[in-house]
């Protein structure tokens, strides 16, 4: 029977109060424990947990867009992309690599570290399979280091197109300050030279990305990554002939020099080459090799076709002949006698044929490359008039080709000599310039353009790699005058100094040149006995076929000696490659029409 009465209520209240005190104590104990725990997590260990939280983050990896293809005029691939193993690291990963000393003594760790702070960086590309496998097997031991696939530029013709196409590399800090790179960011890969640079905006494509959750040791956590695929760049079709590029490269061998070839009707550049050359894939990932190339006295990274300036030698006689005809100094029938030398302005100038050539017309003088004929013309052609005609033929200023760093060259004038040397002009200097010697300088591309202008009867094309620019007109020289010059060039190949440029069944016209690089009193009479750096440069310019010109070419072989012996065979190889391409095209058309 339950208890009752006044005592019962007192005891119940006492027990209830005790229980409430106990519950209040337990509650405060829990609150105090939670506060202590919170203080420990937020204050005592806050920094370490913040670091862990940062490390357990969303990692964004850039997916580099493959660059657009570069094709030749027939669709043959000149530049493409190949997937390659690359070592991708962040700052922590660089610390591991530094301890391993894997990057070698040439590694600029500070530069790599700065790039890594801006985002992940490619520490090494084109890893061999065994290297990639070694790093992949140790990915848990090397947080911040991983192996990935990255599209790498590949040039099927290798060094044969090195200066024409250029190369691709990561944008530099200095370049980011330039207007042309305003849309690029640190870590982007851009065209650094050649076609790759001038058409970078078209070729580069749009990068993609993938977001992953990673832990503090850079290990990928579970979950489906957020991914946007990259978009490849636009394919670029050029007017270049792969066959012409390859033929010139083979013909030059290990000699120094350059060539340029132009399609006469359109101005399309059929080929540009500079030698020696190095394939970009041979040095872009090798700092030591790149420094060696920069210091190489042969200057393999210089594009001699547009940046190398040389005295054009007797190839300049094409301009001199046009000037003499246009100014009325000579006619087609004028004859001048060569006795082996001429005295102009108190100096005696020798012809390359000691006994002389006898009485010659202008056409015959071009074919025989008679210097005395032109020395005599210099008595009646002022140097300023000659320089004016040089500029009409496109000399002394860039051609406008879509390649960076093109040189202007020089056609000297009286005013130029006063500015440059503080001295007056002498008649003997005009005699030197009229045969392409002295202060006059031109690039191989400029001289190919001169040859194209002569071949086209006064239509001077504007060289272009990817389009067709409006040609310029050589005003003041009639078609009949150009006929005389072309006839002399044709005869030079048939029986003159350019006979080594002959191609059976394919009429070639050409002009050779031999350009001195030192005054006569510094060199031996025999060019072969001179030190290499004092030997003459060898030139050849020409076009073909004679009746309906399609290709114009200029070749210079540095210190090669006589133009007919050293440069004309290279010109022949270039023209013959074009001829073979035309024959293949005709065969393909005939086959298609027959089917």
Image (tube, helix red, strand yellow):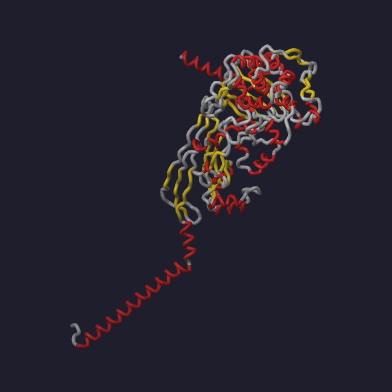
In front here: 131 or 446?
446
Residue 524 picture quarter:
top right
In front here: 362 or 209?
362
Q: Looking at the figure, which quarter contains the N terminus?
A: bottom left
In front here: 248 or 13?
248
Residue in view at x 73 percent, y 34 percent: 423
Residue in view at x 59 percent, y 50 percent: 111
Q: Residue furthest top?
A: 333
Label total for image: 0
Residue in view at x 51 percent, y 44 percent: 182
Please determine whether, in this image, residue 79 is positioned above or below residue 377: below
Position in image of residue 349 (x %, y %): 78, 23
In front here: 412 or 31?
412
Position in image of residue 51 (x %, y %): 49, 60
Please determine whether, in this image, residue 185 is positioned above or below residue 335: below
- Visible residue check, residue 189: yes
Position in image of residue 254 (x %, y %): 69, 30
Please determine whether, in this image, residue 86 is positioned above or below residue 49: above
Residue 407 picture quarter:
top right
Position in image of residue 553 (x %, y %): 62, 23
- Visible residue check, residue 249: no
Q: Is residue 49 left or right of residue 479?
A: left
Q: Is residue 529 left or right of residue 9?
A: right
């Amino acid at each position: 029977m339950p208890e009752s009465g006044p005592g019962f209520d007192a005891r119940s209240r006492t027990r209830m109060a005790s229980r409430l005190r106990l519950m209040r104590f337990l509650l405060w104990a829990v609150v105090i424990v939670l506060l202590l725990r919170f203080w420990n997590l937020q204050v005592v260990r806050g920094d370490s947990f913040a670091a862990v939280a940062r490390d357990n983050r969303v990692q964004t990896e850039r997916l580099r867009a493959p660059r657009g293809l570069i094709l030749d005029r027939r669709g043959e691939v000149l530049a493409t992309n190949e997937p390659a193993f690359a070592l991708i690291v962040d700052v922590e990963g660089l610390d591991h690599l530094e301890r391993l000393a894997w990057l070698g003594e040439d590694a600029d760790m500070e530069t790599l570290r700065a790039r890594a702070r801006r985002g992940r960086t490619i520490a090494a590309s084109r890893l061999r399979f065994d290297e990639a496998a070694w790093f992949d097997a140790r990915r848990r031991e090397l947080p911040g280091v991983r192996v990935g696939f990255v599209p790498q530029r590949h040039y099927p013709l290798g060094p044969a197109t090195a200066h024409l196409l250029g190369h691709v590399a990561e944008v530099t800090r200095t370049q980011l300050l330039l207007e042309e790179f305003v849309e690029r960011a640190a870590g982007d890969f851009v065209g650094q030279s050649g076609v790759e640079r001038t058409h970078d905006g078209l070729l580069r494509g749009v990068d993609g990305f993938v977001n992953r959750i990673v832990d503090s040791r850079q290990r990928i956590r579970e979950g489906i990554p957020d991914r946007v695929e990259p978009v490849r760049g636009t394919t670029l079709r050029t007017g270049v002939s792969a066959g012409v590029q390859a033929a010139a490269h083979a013909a030059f061998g290990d000699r120094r020099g350059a060539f340029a070839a132009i399609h006469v009707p359109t101005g399309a550049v059929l080929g540009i080459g500079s030698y020696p050359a190095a394939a970009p894939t041979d040095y872009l990932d090798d700092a030591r090799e790149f420094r060696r190339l920069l210091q190489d006295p042969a200057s393999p990274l210089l594009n001699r076709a547009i940046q190398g300036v040389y005295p054009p030698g007797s190839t300049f006689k094409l301009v001199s002949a046009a000037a003499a005809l246009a100014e009325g100094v000579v006619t087609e029938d004028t004859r001048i006698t060569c006795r082996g030398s001429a005295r102009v302005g108190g100096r005696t100038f020798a012809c390359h044929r000691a006994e002389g050539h006898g009485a010659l017309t202008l056409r015959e003088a071009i074919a025989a490359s008679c210097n005395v004929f032109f020395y005599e013309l210099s008595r009646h052609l002022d140097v300023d008039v000659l320089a004016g005609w040089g500029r009409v033929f496109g000399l002394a200023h860039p051609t406008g080709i879509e390649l960076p760093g093109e040189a202007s060259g020089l056609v000297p004038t009286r005013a130029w000599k006063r500015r440059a040397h503080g001295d007056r002009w002498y008649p003997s200097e005009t005699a030197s310039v009229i045969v392409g010697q002295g202060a006059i300088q031109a690039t191989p591309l400029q001289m190919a353009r001169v040859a194209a202008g002569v071949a086209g009867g006064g239509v001077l094309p504007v060289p272009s790699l990817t389009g067709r620019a409006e040609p310029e007109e050589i005003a003041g020289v009639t078609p009949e005058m150009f006929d005389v010059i072309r006839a002399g060039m044709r005869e030079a190949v048939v029986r003159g100094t350019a006979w080594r440029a002959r191609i059976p069944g394919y009429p070639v016209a050409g002009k050779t040149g031999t350009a001195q690089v030192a005054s006569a009193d510094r060199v031996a009479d025999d060019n072969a006995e001179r030190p290499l750096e004092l030997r003459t440069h060898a030139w050849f310019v020409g076009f073909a076929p004679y009746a309906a010109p399609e290709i114009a070419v200029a070749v210079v072989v540095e210190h090669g000696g006589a133009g007919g012996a050293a440069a004309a065979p290279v010109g022949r190889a270039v023209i013959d490659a074009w001829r073979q391409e035309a024959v293949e095209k005709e065969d393909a058309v005939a086959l298609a029409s027959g089917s």
